Image: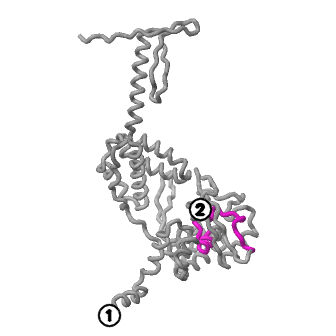
Amino acid sequence: MAKKKSVPQYGTVTRKGIQYYRTRITDADGKRVDLYAETCEELYQKEQEARSQVADAIFRREHPTVAEYCEKWLLMQSAKVSAATLKGYTSRMNNYIVKPLGDMYLSDVTADDIRLALIPVSKMSASIYSTVNMLMKCIFYSAERSQLIDYNPAAGISAKGGKPAKVKDALTDGQVEILLDTIRELPPYVFTMIGLYAGLRREEILGLQWDCVFLDVPTPYISVRRAWRSEKNRPVVSTVLKTPAAKRDVPIPKCLVNCLREAKESSISDYVIADSKGEPLSYSQFHRVWQYVVVRSTKERVYYKYVNGQGIRCPVKPTLGGHQKNNPKLVYSIDFEVTPHQLRHTYITNLLYAGVDPKTVQYLAGHENSKTTMDIYAKVKYNKPEQLVGVVNAAFSQ
């Protein structure tokens, strides 16, 4: 027969006229904690449960799971990055790191486990793959520095992967003319003009206020000092820009000066782009504004018609010059794809075509890294045989 474990004899203390047995233990933070009970048996049971919890807490602290350490890492990052960036990190981490690896102890994760977790991510865009790969390496590097693991299993994982993003070319002069003629009296016109002729990012345009638009000076310019972001579909405008390099003063051409002067005369807001109440646009409001461009394009799209409560998929294949069935005044006049970011890309490309040196373009575009500018520069300057023939002939002339 197993020998029954004897219950220790505890000291007593009287509280409010009642005698209790008492003992002390050290918790996971090294603090002394008192335990009380009316019988030795009850106190012994409390002591065993408390010591088990302390041991488990110490073990979890020294051997956290991937999910537990990811939560801690995100908390540490919250003091360093913007709310929007943290939101993106959290989403990527939960979907592509915590889901496949979250229940594993950090110390048990191997390089093969990480490679297997990255297989589904490799089928997504290169941008998503790059972000997840970066997060994976940061997490395990941080754990290694904190001596929670002996080595970083993500150190040798290749940073290259994912489907390459579809490269959208800059708009041609002819396409710019068609776009502007199509939307000239419509809500996205001022936004489009700023993108094409000042090269601001979407968040910079939507956060732009009139106090940063200087039209009545010898050299008119826009001062980029604020940025817009959306939180739960509510606009938030702050002085937190994408990078320090985003803070810049951009000279603007006469066509944009005239456009902004006219817009300012009729404006009721501090914001250049605003809703009917003078407030900055929410995400859904901006989406509706840009739809004025989308619905006038020949891009194939789908809508759903409900008949007897059942949704019927109805594809639409517009033809150039045709009219929308339910709105005869709406003409399909844009036979090319255009996105808000393409406006900025067109601005940068036109500067390079005009012979502006890359370092100046880097400043005007607000690029933190010159590699971004040079990648565009190389594509613009060296992507056509007729532009290369002189260089090649000179290199191999005898």
| Magenta-highlighted residues | 191-216
| Residue 249, horizontal then vertical, whole percent | 64, 69
Report the mark closest to the observer, 2 or 1. 1
Do we see residue 310 in this rendering? yes
Question: For the view shown, which residue lies furthest in the left direction?
Answer: 1
Q: Is residue 169 above or below residue 143?
A: below
The reply to whether the magenta stretch includes residue 214 is yes
Q: Quadrant of the N terminus?
A: top left
Q: Which residue is mark 1?
A: 398
Among the 4 quarters of the image, the one containing residue 259: bottom right
In space, the residues marked 2 and 1 are separated at their CA atoms by: 54 Å
Residue type (three-letter) at the residue carrying disc 1 = Gln
| Residue 236, horizontal then vertical, whole percent | 63, 54
Q: Quadrant of the C terminus?
A: bottom left
Q: Main secondary structure of the magenta part?
A: helix
Question: Residue placed at 55% from the left, 76% from the top?
Answer: 333
Q: Which residue is mark 2?
A: 203
Residue type (three-letter) at the residue carrying disc 2 = Glu
Among the 4 quarters of the image, the one containing residue 216: bottom right
Question: Residue placed at 65% from the left, 74% from the top?
Answer: 251
Q: Residues within 10 Å of mark 1 (few under 14, many from 20)?
A: few
Q: Toward the viewer: 23 or 393?
A: 23
Q: Toward the viewer: 302 or 199?
A: 199
Query: Judging from the image, what secondary structure is the residue with disc 1 in?
Result: loop
Q: Residues within 10 Å of mark 2 (few under 14, many from 20)?
A: some
Q: Is residue 239 above or below residue 339?
A: above
